[in-house]
Amino acid sequence: MASAQNAAPALADTRNGRGNGHRQATTDTDNGSASPLQDIPIAVWPKNSREEIRVDIGSFSGRATIAIRAWYTDSSGTSRPGKAGPTIALRHLPEIAAAFTLALETARERGLLDKSDGGEE
């Protein structure tokens, strides 16, 4: 059985009879109901000895988003997101994916990546 955290995001209509057409990010739970979208971690890798890069699907102001952020550990040992990094409406994900795929292909063609970074052998 899939947990709500691992469920695919969906959009629930939040018009509340007012006809504003706003949609809120939700996930489908095991019982078929929708709940507000929890952050879904997609990828994490070290940026340096003090920070890591995280890609998450989540929500902001009731809208589904994808965020790419550097996270750091504060003095109390709590992980916190840094200020820099885009948070973009999830509807732009296909264009973002295509752009990153093209960037990777271009970097490989021009020899800009080492073999350890996914470059060509």
Image (tube, rainbow, N blue to C red):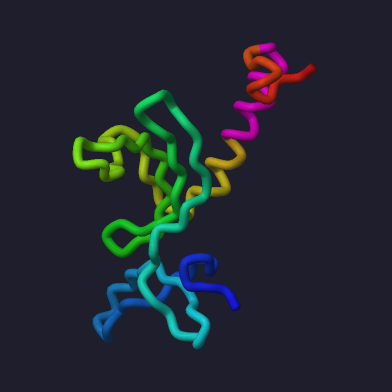
Residue 4 image point, x, y percent: 47, 72
User: Going 58% across and 34% down the picture, which residue do you hit?
Assistant: 100
Segment tinted magenta in the rendering: 100-111
Q: Is residue 101 left or right of residue 71?
A: right
Q: Is residue 76 left or right of residue 101?
A: left
User: Is the N terminus in the top left, top right, bottom left or bottom right quadrant?
Assistant: bottom right
Residue 56 image point, x, y percent: 44, 50
**Residue 99 is drawn in which quadrant?**
top right
39 vs 108: above or below:
below
57 vs 111: above or below:
below
Residue 105 is a magenta residue: yes
Which SS does the magenta portion mostly show? helix
Which of the pair 46/19 is nearer the observer? Answer: 46
Query: Which residue is outermost to the right?
Result: 121
**Residue 19 is drawn in which quadrant?**
bottom left
Query: Which residue is outermost to the front?
Result: 76
User: Is the C terminus in the top left, top right, bottom left or bottom right quadrant?
Assistant: top right
Query: Which residue is outermost to the left?
Result: 75
User: Going 53% across and 41% down the picture, which residue do you hit?
Assistant: 96
Which of the pair 6/67 is nearer the observer? Answer: 6
User: Going 36% across and 34% down the picture, which residue do you hit?
Assistant: 70
Which of the pair 92/26 is nearer the observer? Answer: 26
77 vs 37: above or below:
above
**Residue 49 is drawn in which quadrant?**
top left
Which of the pair 98/82 is nearer the observer? Answer: 82
